[in-house]
Image (cartoon, grey):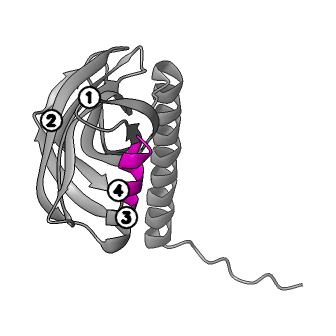
Amino acid sequence: MIMPPQRKTSSFAWLVAFFCAIFWVVIILGGLAVLIVYLIFRPRSPRFDVSAATLNAAYLDMGYLLNADLTFLANFTNPNRKVDIHYSYMYIELYYGRSLIATQSIEPFSAPKAETKLLDLHAVTSQVRLSELEIQRFKRQLMNNGVLFEVKGFFRARSSFGGLLRYSYWLHGRCTIMVTRPPNGVMVAKKCKSKH
């Protein structure tokens, strides 16, 4: 029986195999490090909420232009006991139906571990044109003493794990609020969601 001649593995093949092995070791160790950080810190998403709202004025000028004055208390909650959160590039939009009626930027701030930050925001709307459907809905809601607005917030958040690790992401908050008719309109119902 004749044995075939043995071929020697080339240096290039050994080099590629070595780099593949190193690559997979780095991937496995990186995944293990992420798992350990998660198990130690147990990070949870911050929450955006509207705690209170006051509708000071709301009326239609010329029958189709909305003027409104709404004050609301925005609540930023950090539910983490081991993670600080810094908010930057923040703005809030106020909608009536599908119409954007006001927008406001917010100065950056930090929410320490397991704390809540409350911000008093004031939205004034002047001469915003509404669609025919929105005009009819607005008149009906004023008569029924329950006007619906939508507050949308867009925030750049950075979570700090200890002092070494940082993780940045976008946070989107959305609250539908119902307020009674002005001049002493108060919030009577709300539904809020926050997501990455």
What crowding class fits label 4: few (fewer than 14 Cα within 10 Å), some (14-19), or many (20 or more)?
some
* Disc 2 target residue: 122
Quarter containing the N terminus: bottom right
Task: Specify whether residue 46 is in view.
Answer: no
Task: Give percent across and percent down for residue 180.
Answer: 36, 36
Task: Specify whether residue 136 is in view.
Answer: yes
Tag 3: amino acid = Gln
Task: Give percent across and percent down for residue 174.
Answer: 38, 45
Q: Which residues are magenta?
A: 137-147
Task: Give percent across and percent down for residue 143.
Answer: 39, 47
Q: Is residue 46 left or right of residue 191?
A: left
Residue 136 numbered mark, or none: 3
Tag 1: amino acid = Asn
* Disc 4 target residue: 139
Task: Give above or below for 165 relative to 117.
Answer: below
Label 2 vs label 3, nearer the camera: 3
For the point 46% across and 29% down, the residue is 44
